[in-house]
Image (tube, rainbow, N blue to C red):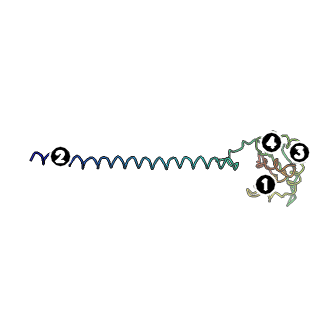
């Protein structure tokens, strides 16, 4: 009987080892599969970055810094409605920060002021009193400034016009 008992113990050990060995094999396979996916993901990410760089694209365009160019105060007569009214307005031009655009605005200042004066004097108080009227006027002034600049690159650097003072009497 002792022989049989020993044989049973050996059989238990043989049966126990394959189960333990199978768990380790499963763990190694899972780690290998995860490593393959991680490597593939890394290669894909690297290739996407290289593709964007080759096409000249960046992940996020950096916002361009801006600057402000203050214009002198404008005082003009508005188109008459019921009585004569005048407008006193302060303007500031928001542009991308560039020495070229600031110099160009300075060179073109007489033409810019002329275009703005003509535009403002063509308005009535009712047209520009509302918020929508002011927004529309701001857009029109931007268009007038852009027309005074020669190159499209310079025109694109004019972002908006801000009112710093606005009085109708």
Q: Disc 1 designates what residue?
A: 139
**Tag nearer the camera, 4 or 3:** 3
Asked whether 66 or 81 is in front, the reply is: 66
Q: Secondary structure at mark 1?
A: helix
Crowding near the residue tagged with mark 3, few <14, some 14–19, many ≥20 C-alpha atoms within 10 Å: some
Name the residue furthest top.
99
Mark 2 or 3, nearer chain start: 2
Q: Disc 4 designates what residue?
A: 70
Mark 2 or 4, nearer chain start: 2
Real-space CA distance between mark 2 and mark 3, rounded to the nearest whole angstrom: 102 Å
Circles 4 and 3: CB atoms closer than 8 Å: no
Q: Disc 2 designates what residue?
A: 9
Real-space CA distance between mark 4 and mark 3, rounded to the nearest whole angstrom: 14 Å
Crowding near the residue tagged with mark 1, few <14, some 14–19, many ≥20 C-alpha atoms within 10 Å: some
Mark 1 or 3, nearer chain start: 3
Q: Disc 3 designates what residue?
A: 108
């Amino acid at each position: 009987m002792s022989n049989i008992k020993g044989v049973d113990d050996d059989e238990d050990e043989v049966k126990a080892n394959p189960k333990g060995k199978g768990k380790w094999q499963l763990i190694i396979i899972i780690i290998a599969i995860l490593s393959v996916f991680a490597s593939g993901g890394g290669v894909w990410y690297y290739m996407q970055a290289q593709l964007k760089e080759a096409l000249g694209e960046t992940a996020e365009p950096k916002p361009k810094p801006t600057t402000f160019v203050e214009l002198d105060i404008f005082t003009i007569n508005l188109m008459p409605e019921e009585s004569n009214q005048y407008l006193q307005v302060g303007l500031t031009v928001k542009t991308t920060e560039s020495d070229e655009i600031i110099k160009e605005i300075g060179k073109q200042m007489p033409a810019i002021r002329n275009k703005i004066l003509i535009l403002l004097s063509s308005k009535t108080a009712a047209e520009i009193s509302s918020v929508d009227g002011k927004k529309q006027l701001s857009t029109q002034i931007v268009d007038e400034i852009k027309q005074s600049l020669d190159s499209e690159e310079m025109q694109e650097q004019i972002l908006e016009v801000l009112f710093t003072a606005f009085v109708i009497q």
